[in-house]
Amino acid sequence: MTLKVKLSSVCLGVEGMTCASCVQSIEQRIGGLPGVVHIKVSLELKNASIIFDHSHHTPESLAEAVEDMGFDSILSDTTTASVVLTETQLVPIPALLTPEAQQEALTRLAQLQAVLEVQENKDQRGVSVTFIPSLISVVQLGEVVSSMAPLLEVPTSNSPTEETLVPAPATVSAPATSSQPQLVKMRIEGMVCLSCTTTIEGKIGKLKGVEKIKGYFVIA
Ligand SMILES: [Cu+2]
């Protein structure tokens, strides 16, 4: 089967980034837009390489989205979108995978940015994966599946942010055993700009059990 999505890639100039957290904010925000398949932002090169679905975006609309975040985005005359090739391959599923692990493997594959479509192929005991070969290889796809073999649950790695956390003094407003929401205040050092707070709020706010987070960035 053929995919109807037409993928393009473009490299936009981005001005105004000051730190790694600016990079993360842009990657998260723009990368989360529907129709954006992959984004890589470089602080050093001051640019963003974006792979997107042409029916959703144009280089102009992406540049606008970056500007809406408060950065300057440069579209030069030479900025053109180029076609991105996709490939569909059968990734075998090891026989020892339990049905749950298989399901989990499928979910993980589908979550990969470089993967566009995942379809179980029961006849051939595998998954048909449509992906962007410039971003991921068949070998890497196979590794995702075979990594499910020994255990069903691997703790998701929440990559630590670079900011140092100063845990005390934490104010807990209720005993730890109660199921009531609790308020905790912590001091975080190492934030250098507003987008650092946005990044932390985004990451922590998404954690299970966190109802609300408000970060303050005060210039001392
Ligand atoms: Cu920053």
Image: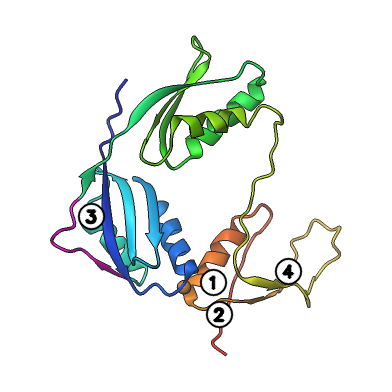
Q: Nearer the viewer, mark 1 or mark 4?
A: 1
Position of residue 16 relative to residue 11, above or below, is below
Q: Nearer the viewer, residue 110 or 215?
A: 110
Which residue in the structure is indicated by mark 1? Answer: 197
The residues tagged by marks 1 and 4 sit, at their Cα atoms, a distance apart of 18 Å
Residue denoted by label 3: 59
Sequence-wise first label, 2 or 4: 4
Q: Which amino acid does label 2 sit on?
A: Phe
Give how far apart the Cα atoms at labels 2 and 4 are: 19 Å
Three-letter code, disc 1: Thr
Q: Which of marks 3 and 4 is nearer the N terminus?
A: 3
Q: Residue at x 49, y 9 (%)?
A: 123
Q: Disc 1 versus disc 2: distance between alpha carbons? A: 6 Å
Q: Residue beneath label 4, please?
A: 183
Q: Do the residues under discs 1 and 2 have CB atoms within 8 angstroms?
A: yes
Query: Mark 3 touching mark 1, by CB under 8 A?
Result: no
